Image (cartoon, coloured by chain):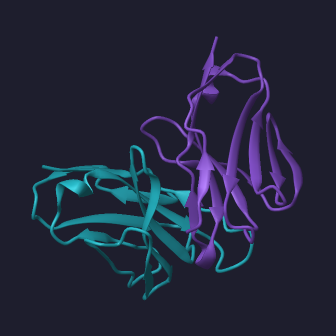
Chain colours: A purple, B cyan
Amino acid sequence: QKEVEQNSGPLSVPEGAIASLNCTYSDRGSQSFFWYRQYSGKSPELIMSIYSNGDKEDGRFTAQLNKASQYVSLLIRDSQPSDSATYLCAVLGGYNKLIFGAGTRLAVHP
Amino acid sequence: DAGITQSPRYKITETGRQVTLMCHQTWSHSYMFWYRQDLGHGLRLIYYSAAADITDKGEVPDGYVVSRSKTENFPLTLESATRSQTSVYFCATSPLTSGLYNEQFFGPGTRLTVL
């Protein structure tokens, strides 16, 4: 069974610091990876997608992919209290289905 | 442009009743998905549809029925609701039929309570 693993947290970081969120996946053939942000009581919101090994930057967010290690991470620079949310890692499986990790809760404190 | 809407947003029902959750999209995306989200389990796929009249089971389909007669609508029916179906239900859509760039976009969710 294909799996996506995340540390449930909470990950607590001070305002202005870098938050590092990690995810591992079991299917070596996976090609597409996504990070969603979910505020409490809200729906998941897509914030990053990555398909190639290396880094992809978008504003304060950087996604990192290492297919050899089956590892994908999300870095949030200059963390703000508004970044406090649960971050879901997702991997594209067969038939366009996403496999989600259970999520990591991030708390940014002033 | 409303994107994805779900109705009702909140529903309380009783064990044994039939309940239908609606999902409507204005994007004409090919793929549509139904997930449930429970504490400790994350998002789990119930059913998905690649196009009108094409549906298939996901990870947790038991007790649910779907149909898709029109591209824009994807209703989810609980034929005889059970307490274990108390959950938050999300509908999602994806614009591509295949390929790497299969980004999914989520509706606002329906919070269902079965008493």
Which x, y percent locates residue A44?
53, 48
Which x, y percent locates residue A37?
60, 42
Which x, y percent locates residue A2?
59, 66
Residue A68 lies, with reference to residue A76, above or below; the image says: below
Q: Is residue B113 left or right of residue B46?
A: left
Which x, y percent locates residue B23?
39, 65
| Observer-nearest of B50 and A89 | A89
Classify residue A11 by image quadrant: top right
Residue A16 lies, with reference to residue B91, above or below; the image says: above
Q: Is residue A16 left or right of residue B68?
A: right
Residue drawn at (47%, 68%) of the image: B33
Classify residue A109 by image quadrant: top right
Classify residue A58 by image quadrant: top right
| Observer-nearest of A95 and B31 | A95
Residue drawn at (61%, 56%) of the image: A4
Residue drawn at (62%, 56%) of the image: A90
Tally of marks: 0
Q: Is residue A9 left or right of residue A73?
A: left
The residue at the far right in this view is: A54
Figure quadrant of the N terminus of chain B? bottom right
Residue drawn at (49%, 71%) of the image: B32
The residue at the far bottom in this view is: B53
